Image: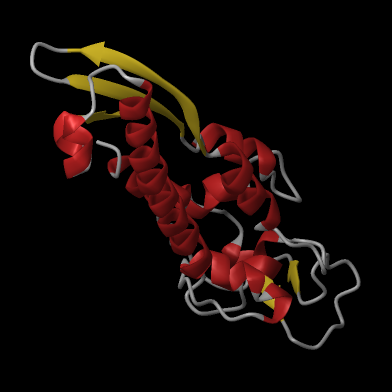
Amino acid sequence: MAFTFNKEALREDARRVARNSPEAKRMALEIAEEKFASAKIEMMNEFNSHAVTQELEGGPEGENVSSTLGGYGNLYSFIGFQEGYDPTAAIKGYLESKVELKRGARLVKGKSEDTYLFEVAAPVIAEIEDLTPSPWEGKSWTRGIERGISGLGYYIYSKIKNFKNSRSGLGIQAEPKIRELAYKPVKYLSTIINNFKQKFR
């Protein structure tokens, strides 16, 4: 993904700098870095404040603030994470380390102005899905958040830790089906990533 800065995008004093000079390129880079840093901070804030992130960070005793389970139990125990595991850590690490502004700029010359083209390494949904496998099946749980997760009708939740085979300690999948309740998909990483990309268009 790339975005551009031209003479009109530079600060007022930059317009007096010679075209294609190291000083012009430095000024363009400074502006690009400022815009990128602001966009990345907004992306991380959006991720950290999202209801799904908040719910998962609440652990097995959290509330279903995402409303994906009809208010029953929580995503942490429904998905089946091992108690003590932080499911959002891998995503945060990815967003922090992989999303970056490439320092090299490509100059595109015009008749009246020059344009500097900067490249941004944006988040890739498929890469995040590879980092977020479901603890009980091969699919990605982040993909399931947005497209649906089966088994809610068989899910039993209790804050009394008496489930021997429960990973989280508070939730299990049981037979037979105990309720007619369907998981409600919610937009999560796709929206966060799209909002980030929109800032550079």
Is residue 183 shown above or below 143?
below
Rendered residue at 23%/36% (across/down)? 14
Q: Quadrant of the C terminus?
A: top left
Compared with residue 61, is residue 67 higher up or lower down, i.e. above or below? above
Query: In the visual, does 23 lie left or right of 50?
Result: left
Q: Tell me the residue at 53%/39% (across/down).
A: 99
Which residue is located at x 68 percent, y 41 percent?
131
Residue appearing at x 44%, y 54% in the figure:
43
Q: Whole-percent x and y of residue 26? A: 39, 31
- Asked whether, in this view, residue 78 is left or right of residue 113, the answer is right
Please provide percent x and percent y for residue 78. Answer: 66, 66
Q: Is residue 194 above or below residue 75?
A: above
Residue 76 falls left or right of residue 185 = right
Hey, which quadrant is residue 63 in on the image? Answer: bottom right
Can the viewer see residue 22 in this picture? yes
Quadrant assignment for the N terminus: top left
Front-most of residues 157 and 175: 157
**Residue 177 makes an appearance in the image:** no
The answer to which of 115 and 38 lies nearer the viewer is 115
Q: Nearer the viewer, residue 141 or 84?
A: 84
From the top left corner, tell me how far across and down residue 144 is, in percent. Answer: 54, 49
